Amino acid sequence: MLFGNISQDWNRIFGKIKRKWWREDAYLEIEWWAEREQESANREEISRPEVVSLSDLLRKEIQVKISGGITISSIDISQSSITIVGLAPTNLSVANYMNRLEESPYIKNVDLTSTEIKTIEGREMLQFTLKANKE
């Protein structure tokens, strides 16, 4: 009788371990498949040819380079040039923005064409106009 009880106890313990292992293994397998599906979807998204116009690319590039409290009022993109009108808190922030634009592979020869002090919501801001060439 003693060995019968021990055998039943071991079977019960191993049965619980086996069921728990199976549940964890099934969960890991589901997780693994979900990761593969996500990787596949990402690969398809990357490989899908996407038509992006140069104007859209330039607008994104101009927005990405913004820093130092600068806001852009308008962007005009013509055949060979770009005109950017915006507001900045200081001359230094405009100069830094111009340097950041020059770092872009798509924008060259950034020039400050005009500045004017404007009072906006009780704060003096510098309205600026930049001209640049498309690369």
Image: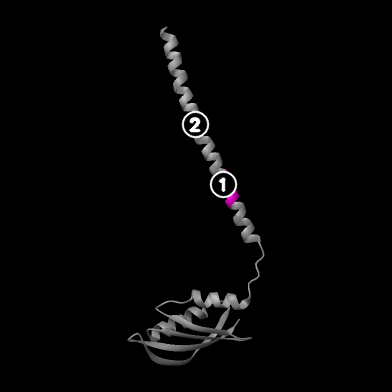
CB of mark 1 within 8 Å of CB of mark 2? no
Name which residue type carries label 2. Trp
Label number found at residue 21: 2
Residue under pointer 1: 34
Residue that protrudes farthest toward the top in the picture: 1
Label number found at residue 130: none
Q: At which x and y percent is residue 48?
A: 66, 62
Q: At which x and y percent is residue 54?
A: 62, 77
**Majority secondary structure of the magenta segment?**
helix
Residue 7 appears left or right of 47 = left
Q: At which x and y percent is residue 6?
A: 42, 13
Q: At which x and y percent is residue 108?
A: 56, 83
| Residue found at x 66% / y 70% | 51
Which SS class for mark 2? helix
Quick check: 20 above or below 73? above
Quick check: 49 above or below 91? above
Residue 63 appears left or right of 134 = left
Marks 1/2: CA–CA distance: 20 Å
Q: Quadrant of residue 53?
A: bottom right
Quick check: 126 above or below 10? below
Name which residue type carries label 1. Ala
Q: Earlier in the sequence, mark 1 or mark 2?
A: 2
Label 1, residues with CA under 10 Å away: few <14, some 14-19, many ≥20: few
Q: Is residue 36 highlighted in magenta?
A: yes
Image: magenta residue range: 33-38
Label 2, residues with CA under 10 Å away: few <14, some 14-19, many ≥20: few
Quick check: 47 above or below 92? above
Q: Quadrant of the C terminus?
A: bottom right
